[in-house]
Amino acid sequence: MIRSLFALATLLILLPVSAQSPVDVGRGGMQTTAPEARTGMDEFATLFDESNVGFLHIYVDPAVDPLETYLLRGVEMGEAEIGDLPGDFLRDLNVRKGKMYATIAVQGIEENLYLTRFDGPTRDQIDMFAIRDGKLLHLKTLAYLNCGEPGNCAQLDSYLTDVNLDTTADLIQIFRQRAGATEERQVFTMPRESRTWVATEKLDVPWEGISFYEHPGANRNH
C-alpha cells in the first residue's frame, strides 16, 4: 500500500514537469517550450533555426554566395515537410518547378513563426507560417523577387521589428514593380486577440532605415 502511494505521488510530481520540459526546436540548439511537439509538427519545426531578432530585413537573394551571411539561406525541405504546407499555397506557388527551404523561426505571440524560402526559375519568395490546431497556417508573404522579363523584376521586402515597443513584432513592407519604380509602403500589426497581420496607419515607422536590398546585377532574369 505504501509503495503504491509513493508511486502515485511520484507520477503526480513528474507529470507537470514533463508537460513543461523544453524541446530543442532549432538546429542551433536554442531551448524552448514548444507547442509543436504536442501537435505532431515537431519534425517540421526542427528544420528551422530559432532566431531572436530585433530588426530583421527579410529579402530574397536569388544567388547566395557560399561565403555570404544570409539568415534566410535555410535547408532544403523534403517531400514530407513540403506536404505539411497548405495545399492552396503549394498550388499557387507551383513548387514543383522550384525548391523549398526551411529558414528560421522567429518569436510570435506565444508561438513560433516559421519562414520558408522558395527558389524558382523566375520567382523567389519568402513566406511566414504558424502551427495552429496541428496544421500550418499561411500568415503572410514577406518577400519576393519576380523576374518574368529581363530587367523587369517586381520586388517585395519586409522588416520585422517592434515599432511601438509593445513587445510584439510589427511588419513593414515595401514594394516596387521594377528597379527604379515608385516605392509603395504598408505597415501591419498583429493584435494578440487574432494573431493575424492587420494593416495600420497608426505606427510611427523609422522610414529612414527602411530600404530595398539591391541585388548585384539588379533585376536580371535569374
Image: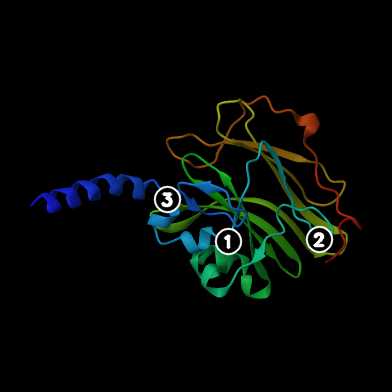
Q: Which tag, 3 or 1, sits closer to the chain's start?
A: 3
Q: Nearer the viewer, mark 2 or mark 1?
A: 1
| CB within 8 Å, label 3 to label 1 | no
Q: Is residue 80 left or right of residue 202?
A: left
Q: In this view of the protein, which residue sits in the foreground, 111 or 211?
A: 111
Residue that numbered label 3 is attached to: 35
- Which residue, as the protein is rendered here, is positioned at the far front? 2
Task: Measure the C-alpha gap from mark 3 to mark 1.
Answer: 15 Å
Task: Measure the C-alpha gap from mark 2 to mark 1.
Answer: 19 Å
Q: Nearer the viewer, mark 2 or mark 3?
A: 3
**Secondary structure found at label 2:** loop
Task: Measure the C-alpha gap from mark 2 to mark 3.
Answer: 33 Å
Q: Residue 22, how many percent across, how many down? A: 46, 48
Q: What's under tag 1, amino acid-wise?
A: Leu
Q: Which tag, 2 or 3, sits closer to the chain's start?
A: 3
Q: Is residue 96 left or right of residue 81?
A: right
Q: What's under tag 3, amino acid-wise?
A: Pro
Q: Residue 106, how many percent across, how many down? A: 59, 46
- x 72%, y 61%: residue: 124
**Secondary structure found at label 3:** helix
Residue that numbered label 2 is attached to: 64
- x 71%, y 38%: residue: 185
Q: What's under tag 2, amino acid-wise?
A: Val
> Around disc 2, counting alpha carbons within 10 Å, would you say few (fewer than 14), some (14 to 19), or many (20 or more)?
few
Q: Report the disc number at residue 47.
A: 1
Q: Where does the C terminus fall, quadrant-wise?
A: bottom right
**Secondary structure found at label 1:** loop
Q: In this view of the protein, which residue sits in the foreground, 172 or 167?
A: 167
Quadrant of residue 200 within the rendered picture: top right
Q: Residue 132, how many percent across, how many down? A: 42, 52
Q: Report the disc number at residue 151.
A: none
| CB within 8 Å, label 2 to label 3 | no
